Image (spheres, grey):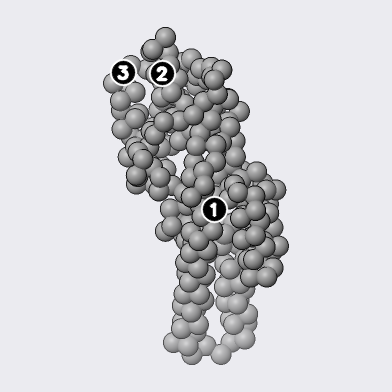
Amino acid sequence: MSTIRVQTAQNVTLEYEVASVGERILAAIIDYLILGAWALLWILLIAALGAKNNTLYVLIGVVVGATYVFYDLLCELFFNGQSLGKKARDIKVMRLDGTKPTLGDYLLRWILRIVDISTMNGLVAVIVILVNGRGQRLGDLAAGTTVISTRQRQSGGPLAPAFTSPDYMVVFPQAAQLQDHDVATIRQLLHKGLEHENYTLLNEVATKVKYLTGIQTQLSDEAFLRTVLRDHAHLAAS
């Protein structure tokens, strides 16, 4: 499976494993099964109630149709770049600069699904992903995003060696304020959060570190914590 190196605005390079086409297809199948079950639930409900109101049929049709149309957009927006299918396959949407995708990014990906997924049953998306080598369909190319696998954290550990440019400079000098026991706790909680995909925990840890150090950044919680650990190690060794 291929990997990409994400260059952040702070000149920090993080390596991620790109989600394979197979994983993305499996995630999409799971999502379609969920949507199918949702539609079937409404059909069974109508049958059980014996409803014969045409207005009710139209209303339910609108609800089911809207769910199908907006499912991916809403899931990725509120579930940290993951639909239920992506979560089941341990993959997620991420920006190439290491920051969290914005609403605009998700909108671009969603709008271009018409070309990527709806055209030729997703063949366009598969071809573009295979050709560009960075896990990007047309929607990702437009939004500056990709889809990564989170499983690598479990096998290689959350703090596998990260890559920096030879002229790497400390991003957050405030990291020197952290004590060794603080760093050990951050490392442990980062591992736990990634292993269990507990992004709420990562956010809580990142928020606490920002409070203690006074750091302000737009980096994602994971990228921020990794950078703080890297900076602290560099400062401690110098």
Name which residue type carries label 3.
Asp
Category of crowding for the residue at label 1, using alpha-carbon neighbours closer than 10 angstroms: few (below 14), some (14–19), many (at least 20): many
Residue 71: x and y in percent read 56, 62
Residue under the point 47% across and 66% down? 30
Residue 180: x and y in percent read 31, 18
Secondary structure found at label 1: helix
The earlier-in-sequence mark between 2 and 3 is 3
Residue under the point 70% across and 48% down? 142
- The CA span between labels 3 and 1 is 36 Å
* Outermost residue to the top: 238
Q: Residue 111: in sight, yes or no? A: no
Q: Nearer the viewer, residue 183 or 22?
A: 22
Name which residue type carries label 2.
His
* Outermost residue to the left: 181
Residue 67: x and y in percent read 57, 67
Residue 119: x and y in percent read 69, 68
Q: From this view, report whether residue 77 is shown above or below residue 65.
A: above
Name which residue type carries label 1.
Glu
The earlier-in-sequence mark between 2 and 1 is 1
Front tag of 3 and 1: 3
Category of crowding for the residue at label 2, using alpha-carbon neighbours closer than 10 angstroms: few (below 14), some (14–19), many (at least 20): many
Residue carrying label 2: 232
Residue under the point 42% across and 58% down? 88
Q: Nearer the viewer, residue 185 or 130?
A: 130
The earlier-in-sequence mark between 3 and 1 is 1
In screen coordinates, is 131 left or right of 33? right
Residue carrying label 1: 76
Residue carrying label 3: 180
